[in-house]
């Protein structure tokens, strides 16, 4: 039996129903997003997860940044390394961040902006590695827009002061456009943003994959891509408390993460490999053919330039009450894979 066949046959071991089979319609997939909060409450019992050096609890969202961890869990890589890892799915970054800050989980797939906001508010979280996600600006199917310059003066759906707005501004800047040259419309609910885009109520929207891929498969027009400019502000963070108590476990986790990305990179165009993985990760039906995964990088701290660019953007928008530095945000060398 080859790896893909074995992987397909393995029962899902993710903690709760967010990642159950959901392959029929976009509507059913979107409905699944709503049920996560209740499931998380059942999974955690509303209390901090059990302290154990051998157990790591990591919050994830339904995005391509999380795929290496999903693969590592589902393919038995954590088990093979004698690591006990629980992936806890969330429907929103806010819920994930709250769970980290209150000690209900050890860490999570996050982004530099969220880590900075936590540090700015006095919560001790630290980045142990970059991750690889993808964000795209897409125009409505009815817009017939040829390129990003057609967005001048048009309405773009975003979530303000988040990684979505940051990615939007960086893509506009890369095209020589000012962020004030477009009309940013706050649509916090990402599935709603997708629906408004497809329905033509928004001229354009910034979406993360897999929803960007889903939008493209339904006729939305990709006009800018974070992957083209090597923009990847996603990170893996842990609370300082978890880093202090579980240093060796986190170091071993990063080694397994590297095994998982090697598998992903080697099979990035293999539909027989990707389809069961994306299915287990809860990605919407039909998205496999439209997906183009990023080239995943080995675990390492984000560069100073990557972090400082985010910090400068936040400072320009006057979103920080205190000075936050690269050193504040990044864990020290012992957490990195040797």
Image (tube, rainbow, N blue to C red):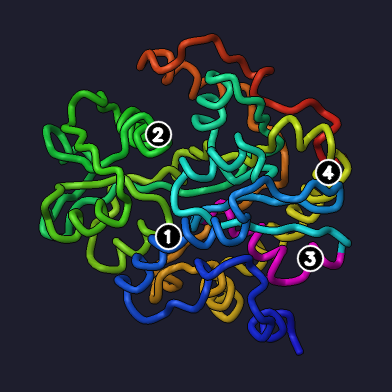
Counting residues from the N terminus, which is met first, the one under dot 4 or under dot 3? Answer: 3
Distance from Cα at disc 4 to Cα at disc 2: 29 Å
In the structure shown, which secondary structural element does the residue marked by tag 3 occupy?
helix
Foreground mark, 1 or 2? 2
Q: From the viewer's perspective, is 109 left or right of 199?
A: right
Crowding at dot 3, Cα within 10 Å, few <14 / some 14-19 / many 20+, comes out as some
Counting residues from the N terminus, which is met first, the one under dot 1 or under dot 4? Answer: 1
Residue 135 position within the rendered picture, expressed as x and y whole percent measured from the top left: 41, 47
Q: Which residues are magenta?
A: 64-80
User: Which quadrant does the N terminus fall into?
Assistant: bottom right
Which mark, residue 77? 3
Foreground mark, 1 or 4? 4
Counting residues from the N terminus, which is met first, the one under dot 2 or under dot 3? Answer: 3
Q: Principal SS element in the magenta part?
A: helix
Q: Which residue is mark 2?
A: 162
Crowding at dot 4, Cα within 10 Å, few <14 / some 14-19 / many 20+, comes out as some
Residue 307 position within the rendered picture, expressed as x and y whole percent measured from the top left: 57, 24
Is there a contact, CB below 8 Å, between mark 1 and mark 4?
A: no
Counting residues from the N terminus, which is met first, the one under dot 3 or under dot 1? Answer: 3
Of the pair 35 and 199, the residue shown nearer to us: 35
Q: Which residue is mark 4?
A: 251
Residue at point 72% right, 43% down?
A: 299
Is there a contact, CB below 8 Å, between mark 4 and mark 2?
A: no
Distance from Cα at disc 2 to Cα at disc 3: 32 Å
Of the pair 47 and 39, the residue shown nearer to us: 47
Please determine whether, in this image, residue 203 is positioned above or below residue 213. Answer: above
Please determine whether, in this image, residue 133 is positioned above or below residue 325. Answer: below
Q: Which residue is mark 1?
A: 210
In the structure shown, which secondary structural element does the residue marked by tag 2 occupy?
loop
């Amino acid at each position: 039996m080859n790896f893909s066949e074995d992987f397909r046959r393995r029962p899902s071991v993710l903690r709760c129903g967010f990642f159950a089979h959901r392959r029929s319609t976009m509507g059913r997939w979107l409905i699944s997003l709503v049920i996560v909060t209740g499931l998380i409450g059942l999974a955690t019992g509303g209390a901090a997860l059990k302290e154990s050096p051998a157990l790591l609890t990591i919050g994830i969202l339904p995005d391509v940044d999380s795929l290496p961890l999903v693969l590592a869990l589902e393919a038995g890589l954590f088990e093979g390394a004698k690591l006990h890892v629980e992936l806890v799915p969330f429907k929103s970054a806010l819920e994930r961040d709250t769970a980290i800050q209150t000690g209900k989980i050890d860490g999570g797939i996050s982004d530099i902006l969220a880590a900075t906001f936590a540090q700015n508010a006095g919560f001790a979280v630290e980045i142990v590695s970059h991750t690889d996600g993808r964000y795209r600006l897409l125009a409505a199917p009815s817009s017939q827009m040829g390129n990003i310059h057609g967005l001048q003066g048009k309405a773009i759906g975003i979530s303000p002061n988040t990684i979505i707005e940051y990615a939007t501004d960086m893509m506009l800047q890369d095209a020589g456009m000012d962020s004030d040259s477009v009309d940013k419309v706050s649509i916090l609910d990402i599935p709603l943003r997708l629906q408004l885009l497809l329905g033509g109520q928004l001229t354009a929207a910034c979406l993360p994959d897999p929803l960007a891929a889903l939008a493209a498969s339904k006729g939305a027009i990709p006009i800018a891509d974070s992957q083209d400019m090597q923009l990847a502000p996603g990170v893996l963070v842990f609370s300082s408390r978890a880093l202090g108590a579980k240093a060796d476990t986190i170091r071993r986790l990063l080694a397994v993460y590297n095994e998982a990305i090697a598998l992903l990179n080697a099979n990035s165009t293999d539909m027989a490999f990707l389809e069961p993985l994306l299915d287990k990760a809860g990605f919407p039906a039909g998205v496999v053919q439209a997906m183009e995964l990023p080239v995943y990088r080995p675990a390492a701290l984000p560069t100073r330039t990557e972090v400082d660019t985010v910090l400068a953007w936040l400072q320009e928008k006057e979103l920080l009450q205190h000075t936050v530095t690269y050193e504040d945000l990044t864990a020290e060398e012992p957490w990195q894979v040797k």
